[in-house]
Image: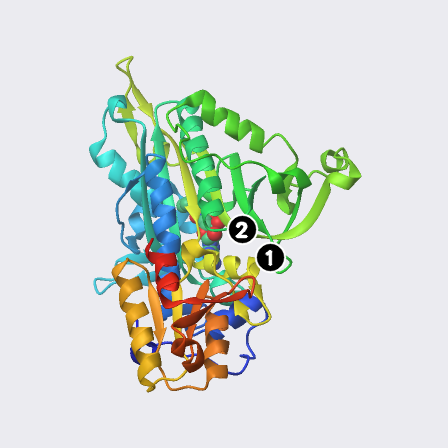
Amino acid sequence: MRLSRYFMPILKENPKEAEIVSHRLMLRAGMIRQQSQGIYSWLPLGKRVLDKVNAIIRDEQNRAGAIELSMPTLQSAELWQESGRYDAYGKEMLRIKDRQDRPMLYGPTNEEMVTDIFRSSVKSYKDLPLNLYHIQLKFRDEIRPRFGTMRSREFMMKDAYSFDLTREAAEHSYNKMFAAYLRTFDRLGLRAIPMRADTGPIGGKLSHEFIILADTGESEVFCHKDFVDFDIPGEHTDFDSVEGLQAIFDKWTSLYAATSEMHDEAAFNAVPEGDRLSARGIEVGHIFYFGTKYSEPMGAKVQGPDGKEHFVHMGSYGIGPTRLVPAIIEASHDDNGIIWPASVAPFDVVVINMKAGDQACDDTCELIYAALSKAGKDVLYDDTDDRAGTKFATADLIGVPVQIIAGPRAVANGEVEVKDRKTGARETITIEAAINRFVA
Ligand code: P5A
């Protein structure tokens, strides 16, 4: 991508409305724009990061055996009347009428809709287990939308829904998502700790929130400090192994970890004082097991091996991609801007032409840009005629992991400078070596 032809509206000044660093940096880097309170456009740079986050989420959902589909944002009120949640959900639900005066709503979550899909076609236990997910916009009319896309009214959610014949089988499905979440957040460069959590309007008794520790987090959390160094399940984790996944779940729930709603002061005080971590956190995921809460009122049942009909046991599993992007920034930035983990960086490399219009600099940059693009890298080429200082500031602000800087002096020697955004380390190497580093 040539910067001269891209759309990346950088802000020079700090926006006044931004109270936390991620919101400030997302606005300054031209990643998002507020359209109305708590409703955002994702501008091209932001969209690139969001797409990469979603690709990792999708990859881990698929690995764990979940199957992707796509459900609509607008739902009929009738479904929610069946489950009894239409009235219970309250003012957070955006209620709409269509031209025939039929009550509709902008979905805040999809338990009812997916249960309807399930009951319309699954009739036998032989078709279980089943886990269906999508990555879709949701709307919740939050009392206090704030911090940009961290708590917005329209937001994106990856929501998965599992169906099983028995409670034991449903627990295995829960454990699959539990392990998939540990892997997902790790690949996003985050340490997320599963904590016992309140189930709120989704329901059920068993639930875990996945929390990133951050001073700017909205939740108050309490946990054992050893979680910070626990091992993440590897990529060869066998998601069909009931014992294997149970062992992962048992290990990750063996020490104290709870959100403020579930906090048990006495149990926390039993943790040795030096091991107690009482902190603030950002909830990036939340998983639930709620048994037959939706399947019973909505008549979602299958024939079991005993020939009888059984209401299915369900769970639901959410991740907030549009919250994850600011959460990653909260965890990874410095005074100059964002520092993206390579896995979600909007570009892999930025090539900075220090003297656009100078034949040798132009030729060198074009050569590098073409070679790295051909090798499948996402390359941003700063071919603008901005001042060098502006270019460096922009490259640092948008947080691309590697900068290749081509200035007249180095280029005359057949060299470029390579800068690591995270460490700030710079080295001067030959143009060929710079290309080979990414192509090899
Ligand atoms: C689980 C999947 C549910 O809705 N039903 C389907 C269940 N859970 S949840 O905890 O309410 O939300 C799941 C995740 O969505 C993100 N999230 C938000 N992100 C941005 N702005 C919001 N207002 C918002 N509300 C929820 C969070 O990451 C949450 O864990």
Residue 281 vs residue 153: left or right? right
* Amino acid type of the residue tagged 2 in the rendering: Glu
Q: Is 270 positioned to the left or the right of 159 in the image?
A: right
Can you give x and y, in whole percent of width and height, for residue 115 in the image? 31, 38
Residue 291, image x and y in percent?
43, 30
Residue picked out by circle 2: 283
Viewer-closest of 408 and 397: 408
Which residue is nearer to you in this view: 145 or 195? 195
**Residue with the mark numbered 1:** 218
Quick one: which residue is furthest to the front in this view? 413
Secondary structure beneath dot 2 equals strand
Locate the N terminus by quadrant. Answer: bottom left
Residue at 38%, 47% in the rendered image = 57
- Whether disc 2's CB lies below 8 Å from ligand 1 is answered yes
Does the rendering let one see residue 35?
no
Crowd around label 1: few <14 · some 14–19 · many ≥20 (10 Å): few
Q: Are marks 2 and 1 in contact (CB under 8 Å)?
A: yes
Mark closest to the chain's N terminus, 2 or 1: 1
Task: Look at the numbered disc 1 and say if its residue's Cβ is closer than 8 Å to ligand 1.
Answer: no
Q: CA distance from mark 2 to mark 1?
A: 8 Å
Local secondary structure at mark 1:
loop
Q: In the figure, 430 relative to 201: above or below?
A: below
Q: Position of residue 26 (x, y in %)?
A: 48, 70
Q: Is residue 366 visible?
A: yes
Q: Amino acid at mark 1?
A: Glu
- Which numbered circle lies on residue 336? none
**Dot 2 alpha-carbon crowd within 10 angstroms: few under 14, some 14 to 19, many 20 or more:** many
Residue 119, compared with residue 9, is above or below; it is: above
